[in-house]
Amino acid sequence: MVSFVGTNVMGASFEITDRYSDLEPRGCGSSGMICSARDSISNSTVAIKKIISPFDTPALAKRTYREVHLLSHLRHDNLINMTDIFISPSEDLYIVTECIMTDLHHLLSAASKSLEGQFTQFFTYQMLRGMKYIHSAGIIHRDLKPSNILINDNCDLKICDFGLAREQDAQMTGYVSTRYYRAPEIMLTWQKYTYAVDMWSVGCILAEMIIGKPLFPGKDHVHQFKLITEILGKPSEEVMKRIFSESTLKFVNSLPDTEPRGLASVVGDADPQAMDLLEKMLQIDPYKRITTEEALKHPYVLTYQDSDDEPVCKKQLDWSLLDSELSASEWKNSMYSEILDYHSGSCDWQYDHVPPTGKVQNMLAEEMGGTY
């Protein structure tokens, strides 16, 4: 039978299974706290993310379920790996992953300058390798940024935070991703967008590694778009034809017709191959942006490229449940079902989802040996 142990970490209560000990605070987010801990089964250090009251609202419950579902099914060297998941008796959610102590944001902040070329090159390759796998599963990450790029002492890179991930071509809201890394088509209020939004983000991250600071540090979305057009120029007529918002069209047309400064004016004397890849990633027209498969064959990352070791996901994700509009209690039941599947080892891309009932909690309690 699984026992739960209560402990206090910097004023926050953690209610975890007795498998884990020696909790140390590692960071706080909008939804809760992350601690490192000792896993007595694997005899390793892990990260435990506590999500407080995950079923308070349908929106929060849906985002949380989506992230857990993706973590359960996506397995790749360059993605964060979930090793355990449980809901405490007080109904907070705990996600356990491998523990990686730093991220690219902190690495860049600590360096206070650009990274050495070999590190920039290696990190770029690993990002592309991970994104190839994500895209092959039919998923757009939508929130790539340095703080979601984890890096360990061996310079192994792991992409994390799938809470905003969506399928390609779905009807989407415009407000996704942190502003500095947001693709122009999102700001142009396109209702549908593609994997290309992630490639724009990778380009912004690559540029930041080269120059040591954000490439487009906009104060708001209007300023953000102005910074982009000052460097890359205004959108082409082809792009303008895809804008259906009158107010957006009016704003874009009001921008001055000045000669763009070009990436070289900001990036400076970067590696010519890095500049070429950047220019292919940072195309305002998403249909002209380089893909992950194409980028992995680019000369800039050729040193690391190995087509036999760049796996794709064998099955695309079924979004029928993930895009459902359910109540918070229905998402809660779905979460219990997902956790039960995870612990029974039956997670599969194509499992048939049975509408959950109140029996699911009892099944999970029986499986875990606890009371829910």
Image (tube, rainbow, N blue to C red):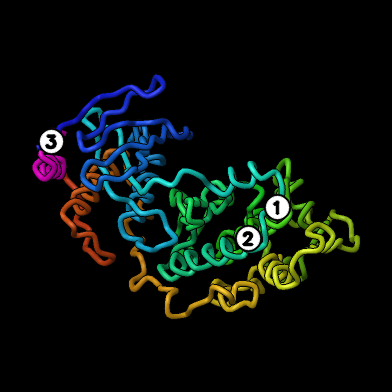
**Of the pair 319 and 79, the residue shown nearer to us:** 79
**Is residue 257 rendered to the left or right of residue 185?**
right
Q: Main secondary structure of the magenta part?
A: helix
34, 319: nearer the viewer: 34
Reply yes or no: does residue 338 show up in magenta. no
Q: Are marks 1 and 2 in contact (CB under 8 Å)?
A: yes
Q: Give the residue pinned by disc 1.
A: 114
Residue 79 at what x, y percent from top left? 42, 58
Q: Amino acid at mark 2?
A: Thr
Which residue position holds label 2?
120
Q: Residues within 10 Å of mark 2 (few under 14, many from 20)?
A: some
Q: Is residue 370 magenta?
A: yes
On the image, numbered disc 3 is attached to which residue? 370
Residue at image x 48%, y 69%?
Answer: 132
Along the horizontal axis of the image, is 211 left or right of 338? right
Q: Mark 3 and mark 1: span between their CA atoms?
A: 50 Å
N-terminal of the pair, mark 3 or mark 2, is 2
- Amino acid type of the residue that numbered disc 1 sits on in the rendered structure: Ser
Quadrant (top left, top right, bottom left, bottom right) of the N terminus: top left
The residue positioned 53% from the left and 76% from the top of the image is: 305
Give, as a three-letter code, the residue at label 3.
Answer: Gly
Q: Position of residue 29 (x, y in %)?
A: 48, 35
Which element is circle 3 on? loop
- How far apart marks 1 and 2 lie (CA) works out to 9 Å
The residue that appears at 29% across and 50% down in the rendered structure is 83
The answer to whether one can see residue 337 in this image is yes
